[in-house]
Image (cartoon, rainbow, N blue to C red):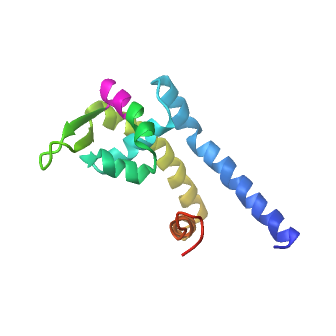
Amino acid sequence: MDKNREDQLNETLMLFYFAYRTFIKEPDRILSQHGIHRLHHRILFFVARQPNISVHELLDTLEVTKQALHAPTRQLVEMGYMTSEPASHDRRVRELKLTEKGEALERQLSDVQRGKMNEIFESMGSDSEETWKEVMKSIIAVDESKTEDGSTT
């Protein structure tokens, strides 16, 4: 890769980093008022999209360890944001669901981010959202094409 292209990509990486930092700033502030963190938000977000998601499915979605998920999940249950109940089809499976309190917090957090995205896409024109989604899907596809040893398939 030539130096000019490397510099261009470094600028892209910096923009990506600074955009992400800005994107999470307000939700992080809201989370801190509740004494919880970014992983709690991710849990709330995905449980809101898939009520009665199993703990195992959530682990797969978030790509975190059982140990990393256990404490935040327990905290969200103890704080009344979420329930954890045995599944009707298998009592050994725990299913997670947001309470009204959890739905309200998740909506507050995600509304901030949805609002930012909506404002940006509206200001940039009709194709900007689809282009952005294609870039994000391409980043995901590159990650998913790697094997466990780091080589590509």
Name the residue rendered at 55%, 36% in the picture. Answer: 26
Place of residue 82 in the rendered image (x, y in percent of width and height, measured from the top left): 29, 34
| Magenta stretch: includes residue 90 | no
Q: What span is in magenta? A: 73-81
**Residue 150: quadrant of the picture:** bottom right
Residue 48 visible in the displayed image: no
Place of residue 142 in the rendered image (x, y in percent of width and height, measured from the top left): 57, 69
Residue 53 visible in the displayed image: yes
| Magenta stretch: includes residue 75 | yes
Report the front residue among 25 and 57. 57
Report the front residue among 83 and 122. 83
Report the front residue among 50 and 152. 152
Principal SS element in the magenta part? helix
Q: Residue furthest front?
A: 149
> The C terminus appears in which quarter of the rendering?
bottom right
**Residue 131: quadrant of the picture:** bottom right
Place of residue 70 in the rendered image (x, y in percent of width and height, measured from the top left): 38, 35
In the image, is 39 to the left or to the right of 86? right
In the image, is 78 to the left or to the right of 43? left
In the image, is 89 to the left or to the right of 129? left
In the image, is 10 to the left or to the right of 27? right
Q: Residue furthest bottom?
A: 153
**Looking at the picture, does residue 85 appear above or below residue 124?**
above
Report the front residue among 100 and 92. 92
